Image (tube, grey):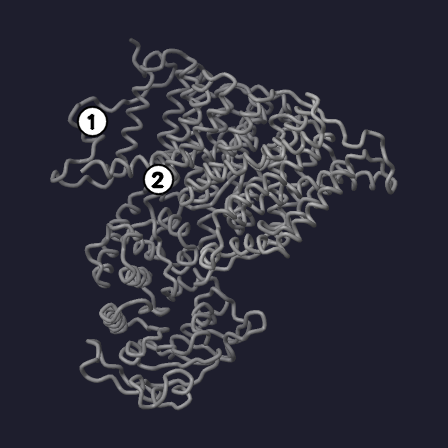
Amino acid sequence: MAEFAQFVFSGITVGAIYALVGLGFSIIYNASRVINFAQGEFVMIGGLTTAMLVERGVPVPLAAAVAIIAAVIAGLALEKLAVEQAREAPVVTLIIITVGASIFLRGLAQVVFDRNYHALAGFSGEAPIHVGGATVVPQTLWVIGTAAALVIALWWFFGRTLLGKAILATSYDSLAAQLVGIGTRALLSLSFGLSAALGAVGGILIAPISLTSHDMGVMLGLKGFAAAVLGGLGSGLGAVAGGLLLGLVEALGAGYVSSSYKDAIAFVIILLVLFLRPTGLFGRRRTERV
Amino acid sequence: MRGPGQHLPGLSRQLPRPAPRTLLALLLPPAPGAGRDPPWLARYRGLFALALAMALLPWLLPNNFFFGVAILVGLNAIVCVGLNLLIGYAGQISLGHAAFFGLGAYVSAILSAQFGWEPALAMLAGAVVVGLLAFVVARPILRLSGHYLAMATLGLGVIISIVLVHETRLTGGPDGMAVPPLRLLGTEIVGARAWYWLVAGALLIAVWLALNLVDSPLGRALRGLESSEVAAESVAIDTVRTKTRVFVISAVFASVAGSLFAHYSGFLTPAEASFPRSIELVTMVVLGGMASTYGAVVGAAILTVLPQALTVFHDYEQVMLGLILMLTMVFMPKGLVPNLALYLKRRLP
Amino acid sequence: MSLLEVSGLSHGFGGVAAIDDLSFAVAEGEVLSVIGPNGAGKTTLFNLITGIYKPARGHILFAGREVGGLAPFALARLGIARTFQNLQIFLAMTAAENVMVGLHRHLDARMLPALFRLPWIARADRRAREEASGLLDFVGLSELGEATADELSYGALKRLEFARALATRPRLLLLDEPAAGLNASETQAIDALIAKVAKSGVTVLLVEHDMKLVMGVSHRILVLDYGRKLAEGSAVDVRSDPQVIAAYLGQAGSSLAQPPSAARRPPAAPPIDVSGEA
């Protein structure tokens, strides 16, 4: 039983990160119909920048703030300089642009930092805590707590504020939104910035648990995308549910079946869900009027 | 200067007879007023140009290393031509095609290395296995659309890739496995030059098949269903069956290319089936130009050669690669070949 | 015998009945128009007949055979073709290619012959091109075969969709608002086209709001309102039916309630009165 609790905590922890990355995918998808393959790189920027700055003696909160700002700048630059320039292009082209951006950002990180792994100390130390039969490091609670707080903040933002609702309106029908005076361009930038910030926070949170490096974004981006799709692309609730589910399946699969096949198990589950629910757990079915 | 076709064990090639007038007619569109081409010539003109380019290329390549790069270009091009049928013409996305490439490679490698099969037969078996797998998964996967389809193909690719890494007994795991050379008509195909001609021939066949498919009722059905599935259904096109067919054929193209790669390189690792490889393949197709068979070849060529060329930038190689990709797609959103074609159409009378 | 027979058809969306216990029949060779206010269920009816929706209740018989719920491509194979209210043209292809796709059911669509371009594929392609040319002439788009569809005007695209539907060599042709968005002369052209098609033996089921077109070209009219049949009969009967006038056409004495004058009658075959026939 203690083992089960251990796996569950491990799964929720990594699942929370997947949820944050997945939310980033969904927000950008809603704003622009684009799958941002550079999402994982925002995570990397957050984690690696923080780690490198802390190594040079910068206090963690300041380093984290700088890292988030760096990621947001990257996100805004991606939107302004690339996505917006190719506004009229087919979606596949835009996706490849984000692929190029991810290669660019990874390469930049290599140059600015280096190719090594870097560790970051846990925010509240490493003394293990016992929760519900499991033994976890304090960082686990940081991850889960911060992610939960962010999700609640986003729920409030999209559901209760005018700006958030404007973003949602734009995602349902961009032209109609423009016609009622919503500045869709600005909202697009905001969406990219927000996604970048979410990714960066995820990277900062996970850094003490898993090592950071210039290519840590590849797998995390992939898993985040999987989480977003699993939950239903464009659905915030879906991204969160998808992320947690993915994390849990991975941890339980690794613990009870086989750790080398954990990713395969996770993807089999995803495929099964998609076959049964072709638009993900909470995805909207797109109807076409003929 | 040693010409192509000589000194090659067991392999010779018929080159187009260099009669200047005929060659020109093969390569250039007729002057205005000079009448129309027979349809086969209009359709295959690019193919002749490609054949000529591949025949002449060896003169330009200084040493075996460059032949090696050319071979890789050719193999990637074969995969991309098939993938382009799926992405560019049928409008379906696949983020797992490297898995078909890798699976074809491994089936061929395992059958020939561990079970003593004749490599050519092993290749065929690989194509059959991959084709069957693609057929079986096509129906449930192709019911999905857009990004959900992308995710499903991605998932499939990752699953296959993981199996290849972890079934160490069969595949040798992440450290890879050795692959016996290919034998055709009793002789072993070894050496960069021999392989160059083999791959060039295979690419020509692949392009020929693709061109035929595009200009056929099935090809038009594909292009139609990409524009509007509901309209395609309304003219009696079984969209599910059509999508399945093109999915399978693109998987088989990848499998054959993978098998050829295995026997050429003599050594195989699971990295060939990885997710980044799949992304690379999609990037080649989109960069070169979707819905353009020659675009797929161009895209494969550029993205195979570019990383080599960019090593001059040392640490900045990835930065430059990413930058070039972004700039190209921003300024040529349809891909290189279609955008260049549009540009030329506007400039020339 | 009726070519198309609908009986007890019902279908709804989330509690709203789009079609409610609808029954009617279309005789072979006739032109039946379906009219009614927006939201009356006309396009839903079309979507049910062409297999886009599976009927919740009721039957659809085509040439005596139950076809309700079959997949759209299967219905197309049986000889039911349609055009769409929101144009579904293959914009990336040329006009001729659009029509050639319509010929799909009559061509060899197998993979292997296509890959190797076996001889009959090339021959069939040539014949297909010729037939496509002929159909483009039929709808009045003669010189535009090689133009890419996205370069054509709206009116031309509506006619192109017509040609593509005809390419399937249908027994029953469903036209969903063919005159929508067209000006008076373009509408007349469509009118003439529909009459030509009907004369060639194709049964036509037409949804339209343009009453002049409807009155001029139809043999019979079916009036829907809130998914139910309001009236069915010849143009004369329907025009003077008080329920129809109240719901849709306007008060007696308005221009729409008057028979079209000789001057305004479009150059088409006059409607044959088949009232009384099932």
Q: What amino acid does circle 1 point to? A: Leu
Given residues C156 and C201, the one toward you in this image is: C156
Tell me where residue C194 sits by quadrant.
bottom left
Q: Secondary structure at mark 2?
A: helix
Q: Which part of the image, by quadrant, shows the N terminus of chain B?
A: top left
Q: Cα distance, mark 1 to mark 2?
A: 24 Å
- For the residue carrying disc 2, how many other residues have a C-alpha within 10 Å: few (<14), some (14-19), or many (20+)? some
Report x, y in % for residue C271. 26, 81
- For the residue carrying disc 1, how many other residues have a C-alpha within 10 Å: few (<14), some (14-19), or many (20+)? some
**Along the horizontal axis of the image, is C191 left or right of B183?**
left
Q: Secondary structure at mark 1?
A: helix
Q: Which mark is residue A284?
A: none
Report x, y in % for residue C171. 34, 69
Tell me where residue C101 sits by quadrant.
bottom left
Most extreme residue toward the left is B33
- Residue B92 visible in rendering: yes
Q: What amino acid does circle 2 point to? A: Phe
Report x, y in % for residue C176. 37, 69
Provide the residue designation for mark 2: C116
- Residue C200 visible in rendering: no
Q: Which part of the image, by quadrant, shows the C terminus of chain B?
A: top left
Question: Which residue is pictured at 42% across the width and 89% down the height?
Answer: C243
Given residues B291 and A46, the one toward you in this image is: A46
Report x, y in % for residue A118. 68, 23
Provide the residue designation for mark 1: B23
